[in-house]
Image (spheres, rainbow, N blue to C red):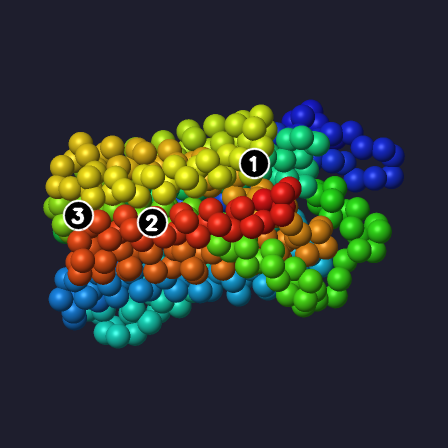
């Protein structure tokens, strides 16, 4: 073994495969989720900035925006299907190979979006193809997230699962930072007309470089110890999803709503806020993206705080406290989301700090109730069911509530999500969340 390889490997008894070192495990989980979330959020940014004009140009501006958000939501309905398919193979053949397949599915779908003709070129076929690619993105991410969390937590030493489980969650703020930052940079070097003409394609096509990096990292790891033990003890089941719904229904339902407030808060603070800033407050694109970049930084800083705090106080206690804080924060929505950039900056700072505290722990929390033999499928399906309920229509619902009843009702929407989440955390068995 070369010196460069040795630093990533941990010695194992003769006859057993080498174990992954902590550095290698955490790098592989972080890099993979960063790429997946970059792809996912590039679409979210484009859904506000360019897709209404390019793929739904036959509608008035508000209808075009809502139609764009509707295609945005398709991915969330594809994610549980991806969770079932990739979860099946992840629990049957292993975490490593399944994660590679999920990465390729997501990456290819993203690159193809960057090659699509627009409505002006091929008419209604353009949004149909866009929706199909968005489905592919969701399908791939549905299989990615659960496997990345398990790669980290199933390699974690005793007492460090919250800390290790935090690393794949960091992929979300890093991906958001990179996607928003790329669009911000494009607007520094080209006018909006050029961005709408062809510049918007660059972030999607650039994903191919990230795919290469992700594959290199993912292909260099070995299987997790927990899954290897399941193989050695012949604990694998033929069809994990059948056992999951036969024996773990309550964990799926509670887990789905434990993550509800996390998803609602995030998409109110990103996709919806970006739309609100550009369309309602009429903040310039670059300033709106700068606010989102700042939010990504705050988000990323508070995820490690969540992991460290949970190791000291307990994951359940931190999640309950954070959910109560989200409920209180909901009353500040109409106070901070006014046509004032300083207050909006305050909104995104508080929202993303809370987001880091809840999102940093949600991966470990959702994986905890499931045994190894169905853990990939169980955690993935739970997370992605939560995406349907809490995230898929959040920008659409918030936009509709704001336009119909006023901005205060967006806060009530967040409050309702927080109360449901709080109830489900309390209802979950201690140690299972």
- Where residue 206 sits in the image (x, y, percent)? 38, 47
Nearer to me, 417 or 266: 417
Residue for badge 2: 414
Residue for badge 1: 315
- Where residue 253 sits in the image (x, y, percent)? 55, 59
Is residue 170 shown above or below 305?
A: below
x 68%, y 56%: residue:
374
Quadrant assignment for the C terminus: top right
Query: N-terminal of the two: label 1 or label 2?
Result: 1
Residue for badge 3: 278
Q: Are marks 2 and 3 in contact (CB under 8 Å)?
A: no
The answer to whether residue 409 of the structure is visible from this angle is yes
- Where residue 405 sits in the image (x, y, percent)? 18, 58
Secondary element type, mark 1 = helix
x 54%, y 27%: residue:
308
Place residue 21 in its image quadrant. Answer: top right
Quadrant assignment for the N terminus: top right
The answer to whether residue 27 of the structure is visible from this angle is no
Secondary element type, mark 3 = helix
Of tags 2 and 3, the one toward the viewer is 2
Residue that protrudes farthest toward the right in the picture: 14
Q: How many residues crowd around disc 2 within 10 Å: few (fewer than 14), some, or many (20 or more)?
A: many
| 44 relative position to 254: left or right | left
Of tags 1 and 3, the one toward the viewer is 1
x 26%, y 51%: residue:
410
Tell me the distance, in whole angstroms, between the alpha carbons under discs 2 and 3. Answer: 21 Å
Nearer to me, 229 or 401: 401
């Amino acid at each position: 073994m070369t010196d460069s390889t040795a630093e990533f490997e941990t010695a194992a008894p003769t006859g057993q495969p080498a174990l992954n070192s902590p550095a290698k495990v955490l790098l592989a989980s972080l890099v993979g989720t960063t790429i997946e979330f970059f792809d996912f959020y590039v679409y979210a940014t484009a859904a506000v900035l360019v897709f209404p004009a390019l793929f739904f140009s036959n509608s008035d501006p508000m209808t075009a925006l809502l139609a764009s958000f509707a295609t945005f939501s398709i991915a969330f309905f594809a994610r549980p299907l991806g969770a079932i398919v990739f979860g099946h193979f992840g629990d049957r053949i292993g975490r490593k190979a399944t994660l590679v397949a999920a990465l390729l599915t997501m990456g290819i779908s993203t690159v193809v979006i960057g090659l699509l003709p627009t409505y002006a070129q091929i008419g209604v076929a353009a949004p149909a193809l866009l929706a199909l690619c968005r489905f592919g993105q969701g399908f791939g991410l549905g299989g990615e997230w659960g496997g990345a969390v398990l790669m980290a937590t199933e390699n974690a030493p005793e007492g460090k699962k919250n800390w290790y489980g935090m690393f794949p969650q960091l992929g979300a703020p890093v991906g958001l930072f990179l996607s928003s930052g790329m669009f911000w940079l494009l607007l520094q070097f080209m006018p909006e007309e050029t961005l709408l003409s062809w510049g918007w394609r660059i972030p999607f096509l650039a994903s191919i470089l990230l795919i290469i990096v992700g594959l290199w990292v993912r292909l260099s790891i070995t299987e997790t110890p927990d899954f290897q033990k399941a193989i050695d003890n012949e604990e694998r089941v033929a069809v994990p999803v059948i056992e999951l719904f036969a024996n773990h229904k309550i964990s799926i339902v509670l887990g789905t709503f434990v993550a509800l407030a996390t998803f609602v808060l995030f998409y109110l603070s990103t996709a919806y806020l970006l739309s609100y800033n550009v369309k309602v407050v009429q903040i310039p694109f670059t300033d709106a993206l700068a606010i989102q970049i700042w939010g990504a930084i705050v988000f990323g800083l508070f995820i490690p705080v969540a992991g460290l705090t949970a190791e000291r106080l307990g994951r359940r206690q931190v999640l309950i406290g954070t959910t109560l804080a989200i409920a209180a924060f909901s009353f500040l929505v109409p106070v901070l989301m006014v046509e004032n950039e300083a207050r909006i900056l305050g909104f995104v700072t508080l929202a993303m700090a809370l987001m880091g505290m809840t999102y940093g722990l949600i991966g470990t929390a959702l994986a905890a109730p499931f045994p190894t033999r169905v853990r990939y499928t169980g955690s993935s399906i739970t997370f992605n069911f939560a995406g349907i309920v809490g995230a898929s229509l959040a920008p659409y619902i918030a936009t509709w509530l704001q336009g119909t009843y006023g901005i205060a009702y967006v806060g009530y929407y967040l409050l309702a999500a927080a109360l449901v989440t709080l109830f489900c955390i309390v209802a979950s068995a201690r140690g299972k969340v």
